[in-house]
Image: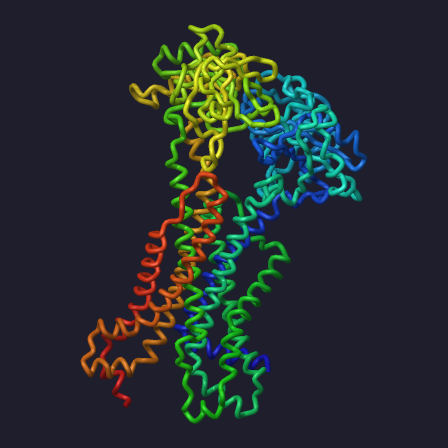
């Protein structure tokens, strides 16, 4: 019986070569698109889920009320981790975490700039980052141990055994290599290349062990039987108990399963984040596969007249409906198998391009038995989904009608085939509109006035001897003509990362907590960054020695503080009284999609991490940059010149949204291609089945354009119906998506017109190819058999 099923299935596929080819191609493309998206989704949901203790790992978050809104953030005091372990038996261990970028690691004559972190000894026991050399329990204990990754070890030591070798960091401190980590997998939020012991924080004076200083992340491991819910209730007021401040922040635990996907908080609760993008592309994957299956259904039912006699004979011969259903399901599963392995080949070929779009390293896990089981299940599911409707439809034919020759497919205005075409194009139009709106939103944010002149601003870490030689570097940069302005800052102009809520000023409401961004800056901050002064002047220690405790406010801070005349006002932070000397127009420091926060810039009494200079546009900019490099090397010879350009750093703020836009555009194109394949197949079948009708019309004088319009009209009606359905769906879904951005455009009506016109043109071109071919055919050939 099974052998007979396969024989009939193969004969049917070979007998209708063109329809089989379209079916296989459509399913293969749809399955390939779905597999790519599923690989990406699997990678996203697996982030940091490979840790053996993942169910016991939590990040401690802080929660407070700013300006009437509950805000959540992942920074915590350094005393929190030890406090939790000492006070709560449910906490088995803790690891504080402080990210570092751009440290110089040296060994003999080799120098590398790497990114790493400073953490506690328990980190490698809590997280499953396996060591290829060394002991996880003791690797980062002590004051001068360092753990490096395999690739970092290879770059530093070559083929030498790195264990117990001495690495010098920033040409200041020696560290002994006590462990080598296997390179981190791509599906982790951690990206370090080395680990240093927490004691190094104390040596550098960065720890500041108080309950007021929120500068670090804290991870904890709960004991196996501990309840996170119960512990959450206990630790809620830990900050208040230690600071004796009844209005201080709250602490709460955030599980490892949510770190990657649920990073967006609203009113104190995690409500979304990347999970929304995953859901969106999950829906896209489902619809791409569904559209491919719809093509199969439509072409199978369209060609059912040709197999009606076969079904009638089988039924008269005693074949039950279940036999016929099984036969047609087997045919669709067989086609799905052909399509599945073609899809796998397409995925393998397209993965490099796909990886470049999403910015990660996905691969097909051929070595996993679970993958093959899932893949076979995926094929079976697709085959059954695609073949179920045709199988039940064809098996329902009445043998008496079929064998008498009176059988005709229903010709009602609403048929399942037309409904399926409408569903296809509804989704295609929705994707076209959505892609256009996403792209316009990105362009809208890119064109937003960022508030400073980012062209030719260079940021360089204040490392090595630069701090003590800063004045010499500054003077020579200006004297050489390489730069027009120079300033020191605590942070880059493009990367937010420091804020305070303990500021005091005259007239402040004592019951209101307001978070204010802050940067420390030296002379000529406004000039170097190209800010726009609204009142007062720039920082200028040369002419005003008291500017070491002067400050600048942005427009938002001046409004929040309620200053009618801000110049000369005093702002108190941590006991230092800062005198306002200038107000500048807001600039974008954080996300370009969000409203600008209040900000104040502290003068030279602050702390500094970088040198900023504006390259002179006089002469060749490349030559001026080379001059700057020579000056930095002259006064800081042991460190490489590591320039970061503000315009390039600012452009990276759009990377995630640009990836979403590229993915949307790619899968929109894929959806349109699959839909067009289906239309092409239906148009081909229609042209063949109406061949004699077309011949008669031509004999009676119908023109090519008249026949083309006749054959295209039915399909274009369906596209117009799809457009009417797609408009409200797209408008609502895009309004929800845009609402996540405080700074966003509105959905405009012309987007739907453009998408509708595009869909109609695509459908018309697809159908008219076969329609014109049928219209110009010689009517003698089609009528000679009559």
Say how many tags the image has: 0
Q: Is residue 165 above or below residue 772?
A: above
Left or right placement of residue 786 versus residue 538 in this view: left
Residue 175 x, y percent position in the rendering = 65, 22
Q: Nearer the viewer, residue 704 or 276?
A: 276
Q: Nearer the viewer, residue 252 or 57?
A: 252
Q: Is residue 585 above or below residue 474?
A: below
Give the quadrant of the N terminus.
Answer: bottom right
Left or right placement of residue 758 versus residue 217 in this view: left
Residue 486 x, y percent position in the rendering = 42, 16
Q: Nearer the viewer, residue 129 or 487?
A: 487
Residue 482 x, y percent position in the rendering = 36, 16
Residue 703 figure quarter: bottom left
What's the coloring here? rainbow
Residue 266 figure quarter: top right
Residue 65 x, y percent position in the rendering = 61, 33
Residue at 51% across / 23% down in the picture? 561
Residue at 69% across / 21% down in the picture? 209
Q: Is residue 130 visible?
A: no
Give the quadrant of the C terminus.
Answer: bottom left
Q: Is residue 287 visible?
A: yes
Residue 767 figure quarter: bottom left
Q: Is residue 126 above or below residue 615?
A: below
């Amino acid at each position: 019986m099974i052998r007979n099923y396969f024989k009939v299935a193969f004969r049917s596929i070979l007998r209708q070569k063109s329809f089989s080819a379209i079916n296989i191609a459509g399913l293969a493309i749809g399955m390939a698109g779905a597999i790519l998206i599923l690989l990406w989704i699997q990678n996203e949901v697996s982030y940091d889920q490979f840790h053996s203790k993942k169910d016991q790992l939590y990040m401690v978050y802080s929660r407070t009320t700013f300006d009437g809104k509950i805000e959540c953030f992942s920074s915590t005091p350094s005393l929190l981790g030890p406090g939790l372990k000492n006070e709560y038996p449910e906490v088995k261990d803790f690891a504080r975490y402080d990210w570092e970028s751009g440290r110089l690691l040296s060994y003999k004559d080799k120098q590398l700039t790497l990114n790493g972190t400073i953490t506690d000894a328990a980190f490698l026991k809590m997280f499953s980052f396996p060591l290829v050399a060394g002991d996880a329990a003791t690797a980062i204990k002590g004051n001068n141990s360092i753990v490096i990754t395999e690739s970092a070890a290879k770059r530093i030591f070559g083929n030498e055994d790195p264990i117990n070798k001495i690495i010098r960091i920033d040409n200041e401190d020696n560290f002994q290599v006590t462990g080598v980590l296997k390179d981190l997998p791509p599906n982790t939020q951690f990206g370090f290349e080395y680990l240093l012991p927490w004691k190094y924080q104390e040596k550098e004076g960065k720890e500041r062990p108080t309950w007021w200083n929120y500068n670090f992340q804290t991870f904890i491991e709960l004991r196996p039987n501990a309840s996170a819910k119960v512990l959450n209730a206990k630790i809620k007021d830990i900050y208040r108990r230690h600071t004796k401040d009844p209005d201080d922040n709250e602490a709460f635990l955030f599980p490892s399963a949510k770190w990657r996907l649920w990073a967006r908080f609203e009113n104190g609760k995690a409500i979304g984040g990347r999970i929304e993008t995953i859901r969106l592309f999950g829906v896209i994957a489902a619809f791409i596969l569904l559209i491919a299956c719809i093509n199969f259904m439509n072409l199978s039912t369209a060609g059912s007249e040709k197999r009606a006699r076969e079904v009638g004979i089988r039924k008269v011969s005693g074949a039950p409906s279940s036999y016929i259903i099984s036969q047609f399901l087997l045919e669709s599963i067989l086609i799905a198998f052909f399509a599945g392995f073609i899809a796998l080949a397409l995925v393998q070929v397209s993965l490099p391009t796909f990886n470049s779009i999403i910015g990660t390293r996905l691969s097909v896990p051929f070595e996993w038995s679970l993958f093959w089981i899932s893949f076979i299940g995926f094929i079976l599911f697709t085959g059954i989904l695609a073949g179920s409707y045709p199988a039940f439809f064809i098996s329902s034919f009445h043998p008496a009608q079929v064998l008498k020759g009176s059988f005709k497919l229903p010709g009602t205005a609403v048929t399942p085939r037309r409904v399926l075409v409408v569903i296809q194009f509804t989704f295609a139009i929705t994707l076209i509109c959505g892609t256009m709106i996403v792209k316009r939103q990105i362009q809208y944010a890119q064109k937003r006035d960022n508030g400073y002149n980012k062209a030719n601003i260079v940021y360089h870490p204040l490392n090595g001897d630069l701090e003590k030689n800063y004045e010499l570097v500054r003077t020579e940069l200006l004297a050489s003509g390489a730069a027009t302005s120079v300033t020191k800052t605590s942070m880059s102009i493009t990367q937010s990362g420091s804020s305070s809520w303990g500021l005091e000023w005259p007239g402040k409401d004592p019951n209101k907590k307001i978070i204010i961004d802050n940067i420390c800056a030296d002379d000529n901050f406004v000039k170097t960054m190209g800010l726009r002064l609204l009142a007062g002047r720039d920082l200028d220690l040369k002419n005003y020695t008291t500017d070491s405790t002067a400050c600048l406010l942005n427009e938002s801070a001046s409004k929040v503080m309620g200053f009618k005349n801000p110049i000369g006002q005093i702002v108190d932070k941590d006991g230092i009284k800062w005198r306002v000397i200038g107000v500048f127009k807001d600039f974008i420091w954080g996300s370009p999609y969000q409203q600008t926060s209040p900000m104040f810039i502290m003068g030279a009494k602050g702390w500094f991490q970088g040198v900023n200079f504006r390259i002179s546009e006089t002469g060749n900019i490349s030559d001026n940059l080379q001059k700057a490099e020579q000056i930095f090397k002259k006064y800081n010879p042991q460190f490489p010149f590591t320039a970061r350009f503000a315009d390039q750093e600012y452009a990276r703020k759009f990377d995630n949204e640009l990836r979403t836009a590229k993915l949307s555009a790619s899968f929109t194109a894929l959806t349109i291609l699959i839909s067009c394949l289906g239309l092409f197949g239906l148009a081909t079948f229609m042209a063949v089945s109406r061949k004699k009708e077309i011949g008669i019309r031509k004999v009676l004088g119908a023109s090519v354009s008249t026949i083309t319009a006749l054959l295209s009209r039915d399909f274009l009606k369906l596209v117009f119906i799809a457009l009417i359905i797609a408009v409200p769906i797209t408008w609502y879904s895009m309004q929800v998506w845009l609402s996540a951005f405080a700074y966003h455009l509105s959905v405009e009506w012309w987007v739907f017109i453009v998408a509708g016109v595009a869909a109609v043109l695509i459908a018309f071109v697809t159908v008219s190819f076969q329609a014109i071919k049928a219209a110009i055919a010689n009517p003698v050939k089609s009528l000679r058999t009559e």
